[in-house]
Image (spheres, grey):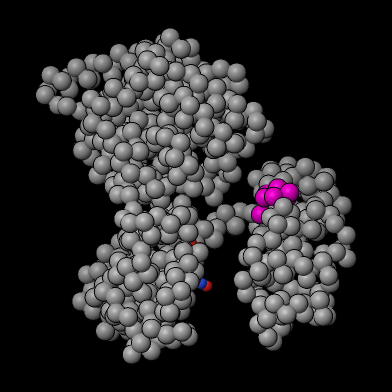
C-alpha cells in the first residue's frame, strides 16, 4: 500500500471518528498524521521497515502501529471495525454539499436519520430546518443537493451504460482506421454499476479515430481531446474515455484497462515473480519498470498474456481477484453460461397484476425471442399497490392460460405458458395457502414488505424456503441499485436453508435489481443451490433483461447446469415437481 492510500485511509478514519462523535482532538490526530505521511520524501515502506515512523512529527505511537499494520499487511482491523460500526447511510451523507460530519451527527442524534432517503423525507417535512444551526436555507440546499446527486449520480446502471456504449462500439468497429476495438473497464467486466465507460482502439491513425469518436451522436460534450486519448460526456451524463494504441500494444492495454485494479495487481505480481514486468504497454523481460519495445514479450491476444503467466484464459467477468487465479492455475475455467442457453423465464407479470402486456401479447413476444416457455407469476393479493390477485382471479387466470396452451397445441406450437404466482412472504405465513400454491406450475416467493430487523427478514425467507410448494425465492435482498439499499438479511443463512430444502434462488435481472448479488453465487453453487434467472418482465422489451442476468450469472461463476431455466420444457416440468415429492 503506497503513502497516498495510507493517507486516504487515515483521513477517512478521522471523518468516521467525527461521525461517531469522538473528541475532536483524536480526529485531528489522524488528519495530521495523514498530512505528515503524504509529505514524506522517502518511500513509506523503508520508514516502516526501519521502525522510524514514531520519529516523524505528527505521528504518535498508536497511529504508527496502525500505519505499520496497513503497510505490512494491506489491512487494518481497527479501520474495518470502525467502518462496520457506522451506518453506511451516514457516510453516504458526507457527499451532500453543506453536510459535514458534525451536522450529520446532529441529524442522526436528534432525528434518527441514518440514510439519504430519510434525510430527504425529513427535509420535505421541514424537520431539518428546525434543528439548531440548520434553518430554511440550509434545508433547501440539502434537498437540492440530494436531488442533483441523484440526477448526476457518479455511477450508472449497467443496462444504461451498455445501451449508450454498444452503438458507439459498433460505429468505431466500422471505421476504416480502426484495427481492433473493445469496451474495457467495469462495463466489460459486467459490474452491476458503472463509473465511466472505457473504450480501447488500436489504429495507425489515432487522431482520425479520436476525431471520429468525439463526433459520435449522443455525445453531450467533449471534456478532453489529445493525440491518443479523449474524454467525453455521453447521454445521461455518463463520462467516457477512449484510448488509442498501436495494434501490438492492444492486448496489453485491453488487459490493463479491463481491470479490475485488484486483478491487475495480482497479474503484475505474477509477472514480477517470473522476472518480467507487466503494464499497459506490454509484458517485458525486465526487472525494472519499462516500455522498451526491445524487451517486449510479444502476445497477439489476452489469452497469450495469461499463458505467459501460467494461467488459463480468464473471462473479463471473473477478473475481480475473487478466486480466478487459483482456478486458472489448475487449468481451463468452467464454461460459463451463455445467453443462448436460456430456454424461458419463470418470473414475469401481465396485465392481471402490474404488467403492461396481456397474455396473448406475451405469448407472441416470447415466441419471437425463441423462448420455449414463459411462466406468468403475477403478484398475490397483499401487493395491492401492484394490483395483486386474490384466489378467485388467480383461478380465472389459470383458466385463461389453459385455454391459450390448448390453442397453442392445436396450432402445433411447442411454446407453453406456465401458471404461477409471485407470492408475498408475509410476517408469519405466505399470502396463499398451500392447496392453492399446489395448483400452480411455478411459485416464486418474495419479501416485498421487509422489516428493519435482519433476524426477522432472514426467518421469513427461510420459512418460505421450507414450504415445499415454493420453487424459488425472488430478489432476496430487495435492493434497488443506486436507489435503495438491500433490507437487512443474512444471505448465507438463506442460501443454507435453500440448499437444505432444495429451493432455487432467483437472479432477478431487472436492471435495478441484479439480485441476488454476483458475489454470493459461488457460495450458493458450492452449496448446490440452483439459480433461476428471472427478468421480472412487465413489458415486451423486458425480455432483454435476460441478457443482463446471464452477464451477472457469469460474473457469479455459473454454468448452464447451475441455471434452471436453461432446461427444455419437459425436463423443467420434472424439476418443478421434485421438491413437492420430497
Ligand atoms: P468504474 O469506471 O469505476 O466503474 O471502474 P473501472 O474498473 O472501469 O475503473 P476505471 O475506469 O477507473 O479504470 C479502468 C481500468 O484501468 C481499471 O479497471 C483498472 C485499470 N486501472 C486504472 N487505474 C489503475 C491503477 O491505479 N492501478 C491499476 N493496477 N490499474 C488501474
Ligand atoms: Ca470505467
Ligand atoms: Ca475510465
Ligand atoms: Zn417482486
Query: Can see residue 522?
Result: yes
In the rendered view, tell whether residue 571 sits above or below residue 78.
above
* Image quarter of residue 138: bottom right
In the rendered view, tell whether residue 110 sits above or below residue 425.
below
* Image quarter of residue 185: bottom left
Q: Residue 172, position in %: x, y?
A: 28, 70
Question: Of residues 70 and 543, which is closer to you in this image?
Answer: 70
In the rendered view, tell whether residue 267 sits above or below residue 148.
below
Where does the N terminus fall, quadrant-wise?
A: bottom right
- Residue at point 28% right, 39% down? 342
Where does the C terminus fall, quadrant-wise?
A: top left
Mainly helix, strand or loop, the magenta region?
helix
Residue 86 located within the stretch drawn in magenta: yes
Question: Of residues 538 and 259, which is closer to you in this image?
Answer: 259
* Image quarter of residue 233: bottom left
Residue 74 located within the stretch drawn in magenta: no
Q: Range of the magenta residues? A: 84-93
Q: Residue 416, position in %: x, y?
A: 23, 25
Question: Of residues 114 and 333, which is closer to you in this image?
Answer: 333
Amino acid at each position: 500500500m503506497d503513502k497516498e492510500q495510507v493517507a486516504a485511509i487515515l483521513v477517512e478514519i478521522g471523518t468516521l471518528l467525527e461521525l461517531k462523535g469522538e473528541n475532536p482532538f483524536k480526529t485531528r490526530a489522524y488528519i495530521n498524521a495523514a498530512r505528515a505521511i503524504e509529505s514524506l520524501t522517502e518511500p513509506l515502506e523503508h520508514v516502516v521497515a526501519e521502525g522510524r515512523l514514531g520519529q516523524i512529527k505528527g505521528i504518535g505511537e498508536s497511529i504508527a502501529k496502525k500505519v505499520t499494520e496497513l503497510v505490512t499487511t494491506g489491512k487494518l482491523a481497527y479501520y474495518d471495525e470502525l467502518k462496520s460500526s457506522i451506518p453506511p447511510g451516514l457516510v453516504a451523507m458526507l457527499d451532500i454539499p453543506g453536510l459535514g460530519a458534525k451536522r450529520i451527527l446532529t441529524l442522526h442524534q436528534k432525528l434518527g436519520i441514518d440514510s439519504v432517503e430519510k434525510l430527504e423525507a425529513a427535509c420535505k417535512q421541514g424537520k431539518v430546518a428546525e434543528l439548531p444551526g440548520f434553518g430554511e436555507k440550509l434545508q433547501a440546499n440539502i434537498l437540492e443537493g440530494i436531488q442533483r446527486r441523484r440526477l448526476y449520480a457518479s455511477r450508472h446502471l449497467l443496462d444504461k451504460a451498455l445501451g449508450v456504449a454498444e452503438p458507439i462500439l459498433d460505429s468505431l468497429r466500422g471505421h476504416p482506421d480502426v484495427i481492433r476495438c473493445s469496451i474495457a473497464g467495469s462495463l466489460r467486466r459486467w459490474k452491476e454499476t458503472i463509473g465511466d465507460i472505457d473504450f480501447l482502439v488500436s489504429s495507425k491513425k489515432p487522431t482520425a479515430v479520436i476525431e471520429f469518436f468525439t463526433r459520435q451522436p449522443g455525445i453531450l460534450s467533449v471534456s478532453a481531446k489529445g493525440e491518443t486519448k479523449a474524454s467525453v460526456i455521453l447521454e445521461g451524463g455518463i463520462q467516457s474515455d477512449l484510448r488509442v494504441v498501436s495494434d501490438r500494444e492492444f492486448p496489453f492495454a485491453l488487459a490493463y484497462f479491463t481491470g479490475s485494479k485488484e486483478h491487475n495487481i495480482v497479474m503484475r505480481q505474477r509477472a514480477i515473480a517470473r522476472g518480467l514486468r507487466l503494464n499497459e504497454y506490454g509484458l517485458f523481460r525486465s526487472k525494472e519498470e519499462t516500455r522498451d519495445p526491445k524487451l517486449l514479450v510479444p502476445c497477439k491476444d489476452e489469452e497469450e498474456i495469461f499463458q505467459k503467466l501460467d494461467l488459463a484464459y480468464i473471462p473479463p467477468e471473473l477478473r475481480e481477484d475473487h478466486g480466478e487465479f487459483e482456478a486458472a492455475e489448475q487449468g481451463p475455467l468452467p464454461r460459463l453460461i451463455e445467453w443462448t442457453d436460456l430456454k424461458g423465464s419463470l418470473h414475469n407479470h401481465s396485465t392481471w397484476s402490474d404488467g403492461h402486456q396481456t397474455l396473448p401479447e406475451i405469448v407472441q413476444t416470447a415466441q419471437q425471442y425463441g423462448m420455449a416457455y414463459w411462466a406468468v407469476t403475477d403478484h398475490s393479493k397483499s401487493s395491492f399497490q401492484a394490483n395483486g390477485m386474490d384466489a378467485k382471479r388467480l383461478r380465472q387466470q389459470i383458466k385463461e392460460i389453459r385455454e391459450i396452451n390448448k390453442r397453442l397445441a392445436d396450432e402445433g406450437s411447442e411454446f407453453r405458458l406456465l401458471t404461477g404466482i409471485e407470492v408475498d412472504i408475509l410476517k408469519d405465513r405466505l399470502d396463499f395457502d398451500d392447496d392453492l400454491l399446489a395448483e400452480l406450475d411455478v411459485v416464486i416467493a418474495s419479501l416485498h414488505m421487509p422489516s428493519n430487523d435482519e433476524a426477522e427478514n432472514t426467518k421469513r425467507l427461510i420459512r418460505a424456503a421450507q414450504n415445499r410448494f415454493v420453487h424459488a425465492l425472488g430478489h432476496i435482498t430487495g435492493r434497488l441499485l443506486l436507489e435503495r439499499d438491500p433490507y437487512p438479511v443474512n444471505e448465507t443463512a438463506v442460501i443454507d436453508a435453500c440448499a437444505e430444502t432444495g429451493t432455487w434462488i432467483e437472479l432477478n435481472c431487472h436492471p435495478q435489481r441484479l439480485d441476488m448479488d454476483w458475489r454470493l453465487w459461488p457460495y450458493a453453487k458450492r452449496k448446490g443451490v440452483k439459480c433461476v434467472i428471472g427478468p421480472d418482465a412487465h413489458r415486451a422489451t423486458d425480455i432483454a433483461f435476460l441478457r443482463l442476468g446471464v452477464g451477472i450469472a457469469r460474473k457469479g461463476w455459473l454454468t448452464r447446469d447451475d441455471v434452471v431455466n436453461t432446461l427444455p420444457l419437459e425436463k423443467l416440468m420434472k424439476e418443478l415437481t421434485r421438491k413437492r415429492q420430497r
